Amino acid sequence: MDKAVTIEKPRQSLAGLWNISFGFFGIQIGFALQNANMSRIFQSLGSSVDDLPALWVAAPLTGLLVQPIIGHMSDRTWLGRLGRRRPYFLTGALLATLSLVLMPLSTQLLMAAVLLWTLDASLNISMEPFRAFVGDMLRKDQHAAGYAVQTAFIGAGAVVGSEFPRLLDVLGVSNAVAGGGIPDTVRWSFWAGAVALFLAVLWTVLTTREHSPEDLSRFGDATDHPLDDEVVETLARRGHGPSLLWILGGALVIFAVWRFGFQKEMYLLGVLLVAYGLARIAAVQLARSSSTTNMLANIVGDFSGMPRLMKRLALVQFFSWSALFIMWVFTTPVVAQRFYGTTDQASPIFQDAGNKVGELFAIYNGVAAVAALTLLPWLSARIGKSRTHIVCLLCGAAAFASFFIIRDRAWLVLSEVGVGIAWASILAMPYAILASSLPQRKLGIYMGLFNVFVVLPQLLVATVMGTIMKALFPDQPVWTMLAAALVMAAAALAMLRVAKIEGRGGTC
């Protein structure tokens, strides 16, 4: 083998690991402000609890559409000194900053929902290439450390973003608006977060220098894509039967919503199933026409041909993120009703509950930041990455279930410790398991496709959970936490299939 292919990437120092992932600190401030405050903003503008999932649907839908496209494009980008991934960091940061500035100026639900769409799309443009950036910049023996540092920054950024409103309240900024509306604590938090996000991403852009295509070729991570022909040829041999099944499934969902009067947001689920079936048919036809450079054919081909390990981890991600999205959407109404005794969105007590949720979210993110650098390395060295992930997911399931047992809101801190341990593992372990097993030349698209299984469950929760709540537990949002506990336990169960590969000495 040619010597140039076997040269190792330079080992990154702690400062290098810091610079590579510091931008994620700012991105996560944006996500934390969104996750902890959007339900509060929607309810402050007059939304009911039952309508929250429909309003949140923008977030997962934009991730579903944006991440594979950005992953595919970033694999093929080289803009001189800006490089391969950094152009997307910078573009997404600029758009997200603008969205954060405008969000607290919303006066109507529609305006807030549209800005949530643009904010989440912008954050995804920046975030998706950061996952591949670790693989680009680090040797394989540093992947686990790279994702651990990234997870620590995610936790730290989320703590800052979640705590902004409460700290401003302590400083005397108004936390309520007479007659309802978005309080000043939330407004100023979003504006401060916009500045922090942009500066953090700019730090990574200015302090890192990506390996050039020539360097990557010497490292064995060539940026050309000789595997594209094989992917498209494989897709071309596939029939249209599976595509027709996707279309049929979507049509049945649409019919069921119409016939049985389910929540209208479930129409979106049916439309997406039909859309994927049609896209798959188009991709197969493009593949048969030998269009190896077509984005749609390549994305669908890569999706259909995911490695076995990636498919097993994808199921774990699906369950894990379903539980997390339930938490983000429903924690505010659960805490307000169960621990503060109010459902009046215009009352000061409800706003106090919103601040409490920000505090709780800050705690679990702080725990995650510490666990990523301490507990996870210690535990994975002793029982392996897969079993570590199982243990952490079970901690999360127990934490969600504890919402039914705890009566004093002061003890919710214990619940958040369990959530934080699970959150740290969800952000680090699947990527550490996966990164070294993927072809580096296609790391962007595979990470984008892997993140589809982060946003798909969120979309499912957003379209289905409102119907379930209205039918089974009207005005009792605490039952959503039981659903989150069961789904997180299912993720731990699905992880056993990954652990079997690790036990056989596989790539885990």
Image: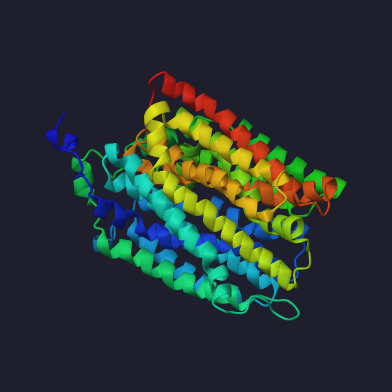
Q: Quadrant of the C terminus?
A: top left
Q: Residue sitting at 52 percent across and 68 percent down? A: 164
Count numbered badges in the picture: 0
Q: Residue sitting at 23 percent across and 48 percent down? A: 12
**Relative height, residue 409 to residue 189 (above, below):** above
**Along the line of sight, the residue nearer the viewer: 62 or 247:** 62
Q: Residue furthest bottom?
A: 178
**Relative height, residue 136 to residue 233 (above, below):** below
**Relative height, residue 127 to residue 299 (above, below):** below
Res 173 → quadrant: bottom right
Q: Residue furthest top?
A: 504
Q: Is residue 381 left or right of residue 262?
A: left
Type of colouring: rainbow
Q: Is residue 449 left or right of residue 292?
A: right
Q: Is residue 221 left or right of residue 56?
A: left
Q: Residue furthest right?
A: 260
Image location (x, y in percent) of residue 353:
68, 64
Image location (x, y in percent) of residue 438:
37, 35
Image location (x, y in percent) of residue 21:
35, 54
**Along the line of sight, the residue nearer the viewer: 174 or 423:** 174
Any part of residue 282 in sight = no
Image location (x, y in percent) of residue 382:
39, 28
Q: Residue sitting at 52 percent across and 25 percent down? A: 497
Res 395 → quadrant: top right
Any part of residue 139 in sight = yes
